[in-house]
């Protein structure tokens, strides 16, 4: 057995059967798989253990251990990051030479690098969706005191989320976690992100991979605008007249619409002033996801949850008026959602997460109904969706088409 020390979290493989005495770039093992991946300064390979895929990144031991610790701490704060699984160190080659350590993370199922989004199955308003997702990720990290230092499209992965995108951090090598960030630190991190995003999009444009209606520099600058709007909405103090308490409720509604829950509201007054100074204390994203899980047990992403909750509400409207919301939600799950997903052929069902399949089906039903001038119904929409859309869609759980893999 090759010389190696592996620290791996419980519930995952030991990874002892891998060829640790060989540089990662030269590995030859049946466990290797080719997956969608972004550009990295390090050698990155993927291995499969009975359907569970892990990313292996070769780097200096101190850097690997530091990133492992950072990813775990960020995950403990419920931030969207890849799962840190372990570190393999103290590796020796066959000739006794010291080899670099390897950081092991769990591959994020159904995640895609940004380059694939411009090449694969389209996303509506991709420019806006991509920037919105990255800006939200950066805001969430900054709220928790994380200075990324290398925010870019390449260092994030994206999941489809009911017509939108959700961004996940995959590279924390340059990051620092602090109790809080100053405005100067935040804006410096944001400026770095704008510069990197512009460079990445210019690179795509040079390779004729960017749609002609997407301007690389303007798109990168939009990141700053979206970030500033989000940060202001989530953290700013609002001054209201004391006889306008309804404005507090409106602020809470806007935050809930963004998907954030509020733990506390801070009220401040000054003597002789008729106005209230109100500042929300936002806790975390996932307002709709938590509500859907409470009602149905389904664990999905935020925009998917919002869409499914709307479908639950429409289903409940057809039941007797006195039907409790939790009862309607369970009936919807058992009578609508689960049978619909189960009706998709087994060989196609794994192409997307169930919630995303259901969202796409609802979208397809809407388009068919618009064309027909009447509701075509779920059964007919499902047959059409499977036959005309899903059957030709790539499997986005992991595998990457060859023509894209060569480019990244």
Image (cartoon, rainbow, N blue to C red):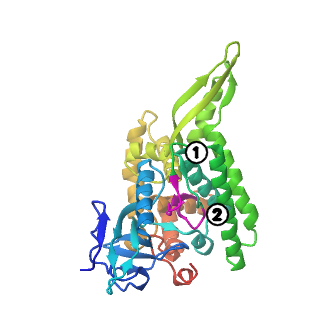
| Outermost residue to the top | 272
Task: Tell me the quarter of the image containing the C terminus.
Answer: bottom right
**Label 2's element?**
loop
* Residue 182 at x, y percent in the picture: 61, 43
Q: Position of residue 328 (x, y in %)?
A: 41, 42
Q: Is residue 51 magenta?
A: no
Q: Quadrant of residue 214?
A: bottom right
- For numbered disc 1, what is the local secondary structure? loop
Q: Position of residue 118 (x, y in %)?
A: 63, 72
Magenta span covers which residues?
152-176
Q: In the image shown, does 302 or 198 lie closer to the viewer?
A: 198
User: How far from the left and from the top, in percent, is residue 337?
Assistant: 42, 55
Using the image, determine if residue 172 lies above or below residue 250.
Answer: below
Q: Is residue 176 left or right of residue 248?
A: left
Q: Considering only order in the chain, which callout, 1 or 2, is on the residue closer to the N terminus? A: 2
Residue 213 in view (yes/no): yes
**14 lies left or right of 205:** left
Is 261 above or below relative to 27? above
Q: Residues within 10 Å of mark 2 (few under 14, many from 20)?
A: few
Q: Is residue 158 above or below residue 205?
A: above
Is residue 377 at all visible to an observer of this figure? no
Q: Which residue is mark 1?
A: 181
Real-space Cα separation, disc 2 to disc 1, in angstroms: 34 Å
Residue 295 is drawn in which quadrant? top left
Taking the image as shown, residue 56 lies to the left or right of residue 188, namely left
Depth check: give the residue in front, 229 or 110: 229
Residue ID for mark 2: 124
All told, the count of numbered labels is 2
Q: Are marks 2 and 1 in contact (CB under 8 Å)?
A: no
Query: Which residue is pictured at 64% across the width and 40% down the height?
Result: 233
The quarter of the displayed image where residue 72 is located:
bottom left
Magenta-drawn stretch contains 169: yes
């Amino acid at each position: 057995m090759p010389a190696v020390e592996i620290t791996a979290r419980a519930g995952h493989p030991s990874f002892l059967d891998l060829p640790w005495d060989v540089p990662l770039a030269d590995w030859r093992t049946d466990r290797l798989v080719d997956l969608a991946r972004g550009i990295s300064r390090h050698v990155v390979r993927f291995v499969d253990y009975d359907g569970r895929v892990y990313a292996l990144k070769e780097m200096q031991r101190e850097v690997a251990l530091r990133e492992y610790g950072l990813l775990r701490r960020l995950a403990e704060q419920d931030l969207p990051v890849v799962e840190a699984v372990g570190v393999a160190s103290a590796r020796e080659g066959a000739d006794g030479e010291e080899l670099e350590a390897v950081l092991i993370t769990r591959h994020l199922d159904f995640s895609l690098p940004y380059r694939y989004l411009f090449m694969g199955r389209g996303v509506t308003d991709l420019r806006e969706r991509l920037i919105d997702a990255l800006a939200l990720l950066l805001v969430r990290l900054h709220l928790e005191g994380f200075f990324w230092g290398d925010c870019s499209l390449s260092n994030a992965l994206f999941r489809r989320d009911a017509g939108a995108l959700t961004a996940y951090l995959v590279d924390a090598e340059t990051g620092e976690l602090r109790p809080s960030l100053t405005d100067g630190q935040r804006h410096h991190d944001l400026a770095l992100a704008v510069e990197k995003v512009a460079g990445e999009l210019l690179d795509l444009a040079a390779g004729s991979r960017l749609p002609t209606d997407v301007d690389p520099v303007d798109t990168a600058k939009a990141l700053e605008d979206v970030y500033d709007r989000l940060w202001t909405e989530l953290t700013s103090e609002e001054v209201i007249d004391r006889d306008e308490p309804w404005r507090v409720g409106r602020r809470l509604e806007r935050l809930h619409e963004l998907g954030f829950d509020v733990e506390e509201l801070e009220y401040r007054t000054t003597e002789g002033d008729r106005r209230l100074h109100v500042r929300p204390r936002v806790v975390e994203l996932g307002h709709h996801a938590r509500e859907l899980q409470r009602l149905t047990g389904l664990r999905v992403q935020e925009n998917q949850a919002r869409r499914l909750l709307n479908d639950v509400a429409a289903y409940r409207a057809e039941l007797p008026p006195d039907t409790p919301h939790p009862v309607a939600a369970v009936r919807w799950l058992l009578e609508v959602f689960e049978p619909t997903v189960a009706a998709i052929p087994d060989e196609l069902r794994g192409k997307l997460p169930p919630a995303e399949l259901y969202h796409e089906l609802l979208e397809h039903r809407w388009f068919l109904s618009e064309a027909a001038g009447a509701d075509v119904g779920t059964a007919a929409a499902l047959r059409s969706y499977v036959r005309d859309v899903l059957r030709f869609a790539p499997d986005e759980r992991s595998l990457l088409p060859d023509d894209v893999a060569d480019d990244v």
